Image (cartoon, rainbow, N blue to C red):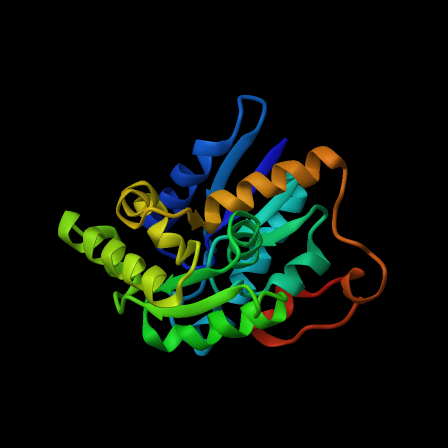
């Protein structure tokens, strides 16, 4: 089994972090790797950057198809391009926000979300509602630390996120916390010790769920909306994405 995580931004350190985190939950018979696109933003913290990340993400889906990858996880909490990736991929595709919400709802009655910048809270709330977890999510909060600064956080910075998670749990009266950024994946053990409730990292959640789907022999339905995109001409910079 070969699972590939796609970091939709172009920051290699983030890609390496994602691969390291996912490797914690794979057995010896599973090959895991992480890649990032050759084009796109250094991080994704706006709708503009999310839109520009999608072509590079789809580039990596196509390359994975060609090399026999069995399933993909989109390692960005906005789940950018998830529907398009499902149309294109030969195997199942999960977004880390989607996977994290499912996991959190299975270990508690209500969960809180801790994301990065306040401006991304609306996107997280939108996904919560789309995926059907509006009744399970008690609140979406932000630590207001930019994605690219997470890598250089010291112990004090990590404790600051953990403290914010604990305060969110108390304020929301929730039973679990979802970490709202792939860049927080390394912090999960430390935050768990401080918060005292299950802390869900979407990278690990998506990796575990993908293994289950692949072992079940289940992939994306090809009926209707997720059927392969129709053959159509593409112009300009998007010409290489033409489907024949």
Question: Do we see residue 35 in this rendering?
Answer: no
Residue at image location 77% in from the left, 71% down from the top: 232
Q: Quadrant of the N terminus?
A: top right
Q: Position of residue 111 (x, y in %)?
A: 46, 59
Q: Nearer the viewer, residue 199 or 204?
A: 199
In the rendered structure, the answer to whether residue 167 lies left or right of residue 24 reads left
Q: Is residue 241 above or below residue 196?
A: below
Q: Quadrant of residue 157?
A: bottom left
Q: Position of residue 47 (x, y in %)?
A: 46, 77
Please count the marks in the image.
0
Residue at image location 36% in from the left, 60% down from the top: 169
In the rendered structure, the answer to whether residue 222 lies left or right of residue 148 reads right
Q: Nearer the viewer, residue 134 or 57?
A: 134
Residue at image location 57% in from the left, 49% down from the top: 106
Q: Position of residue 230 (x, y in %)?
A: 80, 67
Residue at image location 52% in from the left, 30% down from the top: 26
In the rendered structure, the answer to whether residue 153 lies left or right of residue 148 reads left
Question: Do we see residue 206 in this rendering?
Answer: yes
């Amino acid at each position: 089994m070969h699972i590939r995580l796609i970091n939709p931004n172009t920051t290699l350190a983030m890609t390496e972090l994602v691969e390291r985190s996912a490797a914690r939950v794979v057995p010896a018979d599973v090959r895991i790797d992480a890649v990032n696109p050759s084009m796109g933003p250094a991080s994704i913290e706006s709708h503009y950057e999310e839109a520009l990340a999608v072509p590079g993400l789809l580039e990596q889906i196509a390359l994975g198809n060609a090399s026999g990858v069995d399933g993909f996880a989109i390692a960005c909490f906005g789940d950018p391009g998830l529907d398009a990736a499902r149309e294109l991929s030969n195997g199942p595709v999960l977004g880390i926000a989607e996977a994290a919400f499912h996991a959190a709802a299975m270990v508690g009655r209500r969960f809180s979300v801790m994301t990065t910048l306040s401006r991304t809270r609306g996107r997280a709330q939108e996904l919560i509602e789309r995926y059907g977890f509006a009744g399970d999510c008690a609140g979406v909060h932000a630590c207001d630390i930019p994605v690219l600064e997470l890598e250089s956080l010291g112990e004090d910075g990590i404790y600051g996120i953990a403290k914010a998670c604990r305060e969110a749990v108390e304020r929301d009266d929730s039973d679990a916390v979802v970490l709202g950024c792939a860049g927080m994946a390394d912090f999960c053990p430390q935050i768990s010790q401080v918060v005292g409730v299950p802390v869900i990292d979407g990278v690990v959640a998506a990796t575990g769920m993908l293994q289950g789907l692949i072992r079940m022999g289940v992939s994306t339905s090809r009926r209707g909306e997720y059927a392969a995109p129709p053959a159509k001409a593409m112009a300009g910079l998007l010409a290489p994405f033409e489907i024949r």
